[in-house]
Image: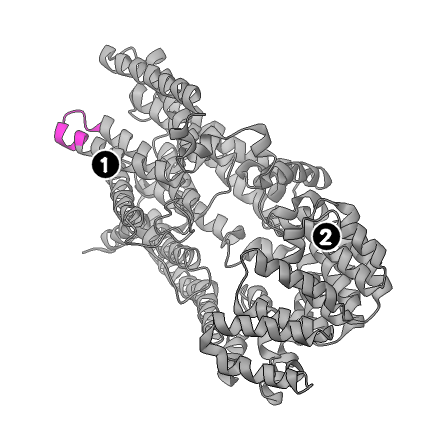
């Protein structure tokens, strides 16, 4: 077997392995549905790219062709790279994090995948096989999803929306969206193979059923729109086959009729009681106003005005979100890092230049589908590819991309590029001599080893050690081994450092537990202090990490430093109540109740309808001794909400207002909370007010209700009768 054949097989094996990446879940790593898939994709691409470069040097057949689509794609990647260099946070713009695994490093890998695929697959047979592999992968995913429907496998996202091996119903939906169109494309290509064609049609029905069960509105509406585009174009322009045109017209009528019927019955109980159909039936302006997109899309527009040319760099939306945070978003996620719209995300990430380049990729994809003498597509196949792109573009308006949606989109663009007519690029001719080829092979091998180690292996190991640290704390106090895992994870010095530092800060309450040895506690404090300071030095304008630092400093009693950090965080996100709450809590810990009151008033004034803001404002008024103000604020909160909140109980205990605590626990017991804890708390409250008889009465009733703790209750009663207070023992 000659070297050319070996290289070709390496490339083909890698390409055909990629459709099975969706099944990879790595519990030993942080974000198991994300990280494993991305790392294996990167490694495969690095291997096949190296093999392809050598293959392209040896044989012009495997070299890329010039096209404006290639120019558009290359320009897009180049502009994104420049935008990332000048990003608010260039390091994160390049590396991203474990939760997303994007950044410029992923963009480059997708571009390399596009180059390899579009240059290697030059004949219809291989594209049909690749699409068949993708469809086969999606069918296996659908079978697993059926297990989720049957309750035999866990729906990882919770609820009833199936998510397969993606951990997110929206990710599964866009995966199926592409594969339904791939199946339709194969169906058209199997005109003379009726068994194959109808088998594909049957599998598509299964995919449609699972897509429906994801209840993902963007993908389902995208599918409907893509189908309408396909059949409309076919009906208008397919002059070759009257049969296909008639089918297209029939499908068009059926789709329109189904949509019209749904609109007519959308208020009926059958539709309203369906967890899937009701999501579509209740789609309205008022419902949209409750979604994050209603707030964050305008933020994205404002952020793009601030940096119009090159944007904020990839992973830069969090800065826009913090700066333009709307206080009315108190029911929403507090740390949006995406605009939840792919076009807006690219506008933020790379400015108007990157956005136009992104649009140009889509434009030239359409252009080359319909350009004359391009490939051997029939009108129906061109219409189908147009419908697929339209479906993807439509659904991407409402969601952000993930690895597999990127891979599938780049695959479709690679198909269009491969079928375009253009001159093979002559760049590879420079490496024609054998000694130069040998040198290139050595360099590529070295680069491959280095990339696998530094770009993949090190962050993989960091993630695995972080998971070990977190697992060791799940059911027990941390040990020396726990901290060793944290130190090993941070020692790899990768883009995982940010998330490791977050987890270190989050573990403060665990390491500061009274059961932890002083030596271990000191080690933890030294490590976490050093790392959170490093993080703030690296990202000085990020409110998130300034907040983390402030909360950590407060947890270790460094109140003055905590106040400085939290005030700095507010400079970058002045309207985020989350930060204001932490600042107010720090002043309460300092016993500076007057300042705490003014801080919590600031949060309350931002959005008085925010229940937590009102509650904390009232609590701070109690600490400050302003009972009249507290009563006035609490009057706007329902008694059920107010009396069920333990934070109010805590402050009332602190200030010794036991009569009010009696009212609270009497209310709880009378409203479904007749349990041991509430009765014991009520007995203690009566005792603190001096009403020993009522305290004993509550305990006797509890003894009758819970005979298993009668001995303990009898002891408490005897202590109370003796004039002692058992709650202080």
Where does the image place residue 338, in percent across and percent down from the top left? 57, 46
Task: Tell me if mark 1 has few (under 14), some (14-19) or many (20+) residues whose alpha carbon lies within 10 angstroms of its own.
Answer: some
Work out whether residue 545 can be spotted.
no
Could you say which is closer to the camera, residue 556 or residue 719?
A: 719
Indicate which disc residue 613 carries: 2
Could you say which is closer to the camera, residue 591 or residue 45?
A: 591
Query: Is 144 drawn above or below residue 289 in the view shown?
Result: below
Q: Quadrant of the C terminus?
A: bottom right
Where does the image place residue 97, in percent across and percent down from the top left? 53, 58
- Label 2's element? helix
Residue 196 magenta-drawn?
Answer: yes
Indicate which disc residue 203 carries: 1
Magenta highlight: main SS: helix
Q: Quadrant of residue 152?
A: bottom left
Left of 643 or right of it: where is 260? left
Which residue shows up at 50% across the image and 52% down it? 102
Where does the image place residue 78, in percent across and percent down from the top left? 55, 44
Q: Nearer the viewer, mark 1 or mark 2?
A: 2
Residue contact between numbered discs 1 and 2, judged by CB atoms under 8 Å: no
Which residue shows up at 30% across the image and 20% down it? 380
Q: Which residues are magenta?
A: 189-198
Which residue shows up at 43% across the image and 38% down it? 216
Q: Quadrant of residue 352?
A: top right
Residue 291 magenta-drawn?
Answer: no
Q: Quadrant of the N terminus?
A: bottom left
- Label 1's element? helix
Work out how far the residue at label 1 is from the one at label 2, CA to CA, in angstroms.
52 Å
Which residue shows up at 45% across the image and 75% down it? 707
Q: How many numbered badges does the structure rendering display?
A: 2
């Amino acid at each position: 077997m000659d070297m050319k054949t070996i290289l070709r097989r390496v490339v083909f094996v890698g390409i055909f392995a990629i459709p099975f990446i969706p099944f990879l879940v790595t519990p030993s790593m942080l974000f198991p549905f994300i990280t494993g898939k991305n790392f294996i994709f990167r490694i495969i691409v690095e291997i096949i790219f190296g093999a392809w470069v050598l293959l392209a040097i040896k044989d012009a057949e495997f070299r890329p062709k010039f096209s404006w689509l290639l120019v558009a794609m290359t320009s897009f990647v180049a502009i994104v790279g420049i935008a990332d260099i000048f990003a608010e946070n260039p390091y994160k713009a390049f590396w991203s994090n474990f939760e997303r695994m994007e950044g410029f490093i992923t963009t480059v890998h997708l571009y390399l995948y596009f180059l390899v695929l579009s240059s290697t697959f030059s004949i219809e047979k291989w594209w049909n096989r690749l699409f068949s592999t993708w469809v086969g992968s999606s069918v296996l995913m659908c079978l697993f999803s059926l297990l989720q429907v049957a309750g035999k496998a866990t729906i990882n996202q919770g609820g009833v929306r199936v998510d397969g091996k993606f951990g997110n119903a929206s990710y599964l939906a866009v995966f199926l969206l592409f594969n339904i169109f791939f199946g339709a494309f194969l169906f058209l290509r199997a005109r003379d193979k009726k068994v194959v064609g109808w088998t594909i049609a049957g599998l598509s029905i299964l995919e449609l059923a699972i897509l429906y069960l994801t209840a993902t509105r963007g993908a389902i509406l995208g599918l409907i729109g893509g189908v309408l585009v396909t059949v409309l174009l076919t009906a208008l322009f397919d002059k070759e086959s009257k049969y296909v045109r008639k089918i297209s017209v029939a499908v068009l009528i059926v789709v329109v009729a189904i949509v019209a019927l749904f609109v007519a019955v959308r208020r009926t109980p059958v539709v309203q009681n369906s967890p899937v159909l009701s999501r579509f039936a209740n789609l309205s302006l008022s419902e949209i106003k409750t979604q994050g997109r209603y707030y964050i899309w305008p933020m994205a527009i404002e952020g793009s005005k601030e940096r119009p040319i090159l944007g904020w760099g990839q992973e830069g939306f969090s800065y826009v979100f913090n700066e333009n945070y709307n206080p009315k978003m108190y029911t929403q996620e507090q740390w949006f890092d995406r605009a939840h719209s792919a076009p807006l995300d690219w506008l933020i990430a790379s400015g108007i230049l990157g956005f136009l380049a992104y649009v140009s990729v889509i434009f030239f994809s359409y252009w080359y589908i319909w350009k004359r003498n391009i490939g051997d597509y029939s009108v129906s196949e061109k219409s189908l590819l147009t419908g697929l792109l339209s479906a993807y573009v439509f659904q991407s308006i409402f969601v952000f991309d993930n690895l597999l949606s990127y891979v599938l989109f780049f695959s479709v663009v690679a198909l269009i590029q491969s079928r375009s007519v253009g001159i093979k690029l002559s760049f590879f001719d420079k490496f024609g001599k054998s000694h130069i080829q040998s040198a290139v092979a050595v360099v590529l091998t070295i680069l491959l080893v280095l990339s696998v180690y530094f770009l993949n292996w090190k962050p993989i190991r960091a993630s695995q050690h972080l998971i070990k640290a977190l697992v060791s704390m799940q059911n027990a106090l941390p040990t020396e081994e726990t901290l060793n895992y944290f130190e090993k994870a941070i020692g790899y010095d990768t883009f995982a450092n940010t998330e490791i530092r977050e987890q270190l800060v989050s573990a403060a309450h665990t390491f500061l537990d009274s059961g932890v040895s002083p030596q271990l506690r000191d080690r933890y404090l030294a490590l976490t202090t050093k790392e959170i300071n490093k993080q703030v030095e690296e990202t000085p304008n990020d409110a998130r990490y300034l907040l983390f630092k402030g909360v950590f400093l407060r947890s270790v009693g460094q109140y003055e430093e905590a106040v400085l950090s939290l005030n700095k965080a507010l400079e970058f996100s002045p309207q985020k109540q989350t930060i204001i709450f932490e600042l107010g809590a720090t002043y309460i810990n300092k016993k500076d109740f007057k300042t705490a009151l003014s801080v919590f008033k600031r949060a309350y004034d931002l959005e008085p309808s925010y229940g937590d803001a009102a509650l904390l404002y009232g609590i701070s008024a109690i600490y400050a001794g302003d009972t009249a103000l507290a009563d006035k604020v609490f009057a706007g909160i329902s008694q059920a909400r107010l009396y069920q909140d333990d934070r109010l109980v805590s402050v009332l205990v602190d200030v010794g207002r036991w009569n009010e605590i009696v009212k609270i626990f009497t209310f709880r017991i009378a409203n479904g909370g007749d349990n041991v804890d509430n009765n014991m708390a009520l007995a203690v409250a009566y005792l603190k007010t001096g009403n020993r008889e009522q305290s004993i009465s509550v305990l006797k009733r509890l003894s009758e209700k819970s005979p298993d703790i009668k001995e303990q209750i009898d002891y408490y009663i005897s202590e109370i009768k003796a004039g002692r207070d058992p709650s202080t023992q």
